[in-house]
Amino acid sequence: MPVIRHRSPYETLTDRLRTAGCVYAEDEARLMIDAAPTAEALEAMAARRVAGLPLEHILGWAEFCGLRIAVASGVFVPRRRTEFLVRQAAALLDAWRKVPGAGRAAPVVVDLCCGSGAVGAALAALAGPAELHSAELHSAIELHSADIDPTAVACARTNVLPLGGEVHEGDLYAPLPPGLQGRVRLLAVNAPYVPSADIETMPQEARVHEPRACLDGGADGLEVQRRVAAGAREWLMPGGHVLIETSRRQAAQTAGIFRTHGLAARVLRSEELGATVVAGSVVLPGGR
Ligand SMILES: C[S@@+](CC[C@H](N)C(=O)[O-])C[C@H]1O[C@@H](n2cnc3c(N)ncnc32)[C@H](O)[C@@H]1O
């Protein structure tokens, strides 16, 4: 007698996702099965995924820097490449702590255009030595995150408030407490940088399911970056840094924008993550 082998729900879902074009069908099937409380819920999740919704919006979270970051529908899904921005920011904070006389006050960190708040949350989580217990770790940085989109701000609050940070709603620097002017040690920014005309060539998941304001950086992609750079010196402390994610293609222009606004600029690149960051710093008197 031939043995009839029934396919498991995992195999069936994997095939369905692969047919729909999901490159990581096995991983996605496993995550959905783990997350779905009932067979009906799993079917609803699968149907949404096959229709093209980002997996992270279906699960309600994204993995970022080893953390589970809550990501609500309509909020930008943090990308793996942005972990490079976090690593560079963490390295600058680390270097600053080692400077004699750096002081014991928690450095002020601002995550501008924060979306889900992933960048700031990861920095808060990385900010203290691993042996510190969490209550002490929260005081290792003074974190302020900000975004113009109320949906993103609500989402960021769920990620950032438990880590001791604050989240502000408004256009770029406008909602930040005025008392932070001249006190920011590190400004970490992943603002929209896609040229408007390139948006139609992006994958459906981004083009259809993420708000255009998350992506659209204007005609050359650099309009928000220009505004960030123009305001940076007013908020940064002497010796403070601004880090901004950009593309390899736009990096020289981003660096040029920083220089126009009186910031020394360096281009940093990770081939591993396919990521480019421009680091700007306030030039200290004497050119340091
Ligand atoms: C590319 S997403 C990045 C989100 C987050 N930094 C991350 O890496 O996951 C850009 C974010 O910038 C926000 N944004 C766009 N224009 C803004 C503005 N003028 N002021 C503040 N936030 C803005 C969008 O709402 C969106 O959440």
Image: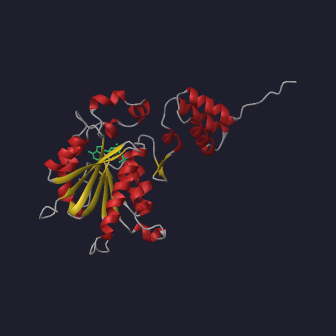
Q: Is residue 5 above or below residue 150?
A: above
For ligand 1, give the image quadrant. top left
Q: Is residue 50 above or below residue 117?
A: above
Give whichever of 254, 134 is nearer the camera. 254
Give whichever of 112, 222 is nearer the camera. 222
Drawn side of residue 145 relative to residue 130, left or right: left
Residue 65 point in image, percent of width and height: 45, 53
Q: Looking at the figure, which quarter contains the C terminus? A: bottom left
Give whichever of 183, 36 is nearer the camera. 183
Residue 40 point in image, percent of width and height: 64, 36
- Residue 210 in view: yes
Residue 165 point in image, percent of width and height: 38, 61
Q: Is residue 199 above or below residue 138?
A: above
Q: Is residue 168 above or below residue 249?
A: below
Quadrant housing residue 286: bottom left
Outermost residue toward the top?
1
Residue 265 point in image, percent of width and height: 21, 51
| Residue at 36 percent of width and 27 percent of height | 201
Outermost residue toward the left?
286
| Residue at 22 percent of width and 42 percent of height | 252
Drawn side of residue 10 relative to residue 257, left or right: right
